[in-house]
């Protein structure tokens, strides 16, 4: 039986009980009747909300990401920037969940004057890969490279116009391969991996031009 129909079926009983008691009891019963109808008018909403929240909740674990080129929150050597050879730094990671199907990497600069600037996008790295060597060539990269905000595929090193900028190296372990074509933008990658992140790691480096 529908919950609201069930509540309505009880109304004659409550009304009959009200008629058999004094005014004081009647007031109490009317109050009880009102509370009953309020509760019945929303019989399952709270359960739906909790259920949806539980279904969408996903525990995201932590991984470890490091570079032999620089320490966390330390300066990135110039050879990995536009002032040097502009090569990608070496990266290594661990604690990848066993159910991981692919790995994605995004490097960006949130301190850029025009808004966050993307320096590197890589996706569909095999779960068995645990490092990227320095100056890795496109043909040697086991994953697919997206387009950075320089308008090119691959890595583009730090090149801040002024001041000290932070560069966030963000690694994601995913429960699927994204299957995007080469040259995907950061936002396309983030959209494709939404709801599929098993674990993540972050490494921050800094750079200031002389």
Image: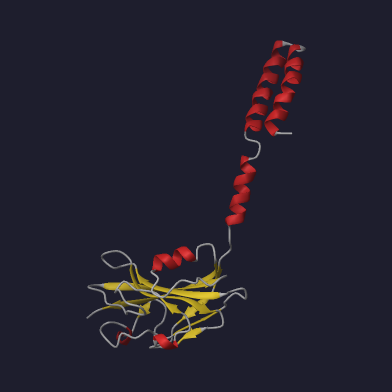
Residue 92 in the image, given as x and y percentages of width and height: 48, 83
Residue 88 in the image, given as x and y percentages of width and height: 37, 84
Q: Residue at coordinates 44% horizontally, 85% vertically from top-left?
A: 141
Reply above or below: 99 against 5.
Answer: below
Q: Residue at coordinates 66% horizontally, 31% vertically from top-left?
A: 40
Residue 136 in the image, given as x and y percentages of width and height: 40, 87
In front here: 203 or 179? 179
In front here: 137 or 58? 137
Residue 197 in the image, given as x and y percentages of width and height: 53, 67
Quick check: can you spot residue 169?
Answer: no
Q: Residue at coordinates 24% horizontally, 79% vertically from top-left?
A: 209
In front here: 113 or 185? 185
Q: Quadrant of residue 72?
A: bottom left
Total number of numbered discs in the rendering = 0
Reply above or below: 86 against 3.
Answer: below
Q: Residue at coordinates 26% horizontally, 64% vertically from top-left?
A: 114
The answer to whether residue 36 is left or right of residue 89 is right
Placement of the N terminus among the 4 image quadrants? top right
The answer to whether residue 9 is left or right of residue 109 is right
Quick check: can you spot residue 111?
Answer: yes
In front here: 102 or 17? 102
Q: Quadrant of residue 83?
A: bottom left
The answer to whether residue 84 is left or right of residue 89 is left
**Given the current orientation, which residue lies at the most extreme front position?**
181
Q: Quadrant of residue 27?
A: top right
Placement of the C terminus among the 4 image quadrants? bottom left
Reply above or below: 33 against 158.
Answer: above
């Amino acid at each position: 039986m529908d919950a609201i129909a069930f509540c309505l079926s009880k109304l004659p009983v409550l009304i009959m009980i009200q008629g058999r008691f004094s005014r004081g009891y009647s007031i109490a019963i009317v109050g009880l009747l009102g509370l009953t109808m309020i509760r019945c008018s929303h019989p399952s909403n709270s359960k739906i909300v909790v259920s949806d929240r539980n279904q969408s909740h996903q525990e995201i674990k932590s991984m470890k990401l490091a570079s032999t080129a620089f320490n966390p929150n330390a300066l990135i050597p110039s050879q990995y920037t536009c002032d040097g050879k502009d090569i990608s730094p070496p990266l290594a990671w661990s604690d990848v969940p066993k159910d991981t199907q692919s790995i994605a990497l995004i490097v960006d600069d949130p301190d850029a004057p025009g808004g966050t600037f993307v320096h590197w996008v890589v996706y569909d790295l095999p779960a068995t890969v645990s490092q990227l060597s320095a100056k890795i060539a496109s043909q040697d990269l086991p994953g697919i490279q997206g387009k950075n905000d320089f308008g090119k595929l691959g890595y583009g090193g730090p090149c801040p116009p002024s001041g000290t900028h932070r560069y966030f190296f963000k690694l994601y372990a995913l429960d699927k391969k994204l299957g995007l074509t080469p040259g995907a933008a950061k936002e396309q990658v983030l959209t494709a991996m939404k709801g599929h992140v098993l674990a993540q790691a972050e490494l921050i480096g800094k750079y200031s031009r002389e």
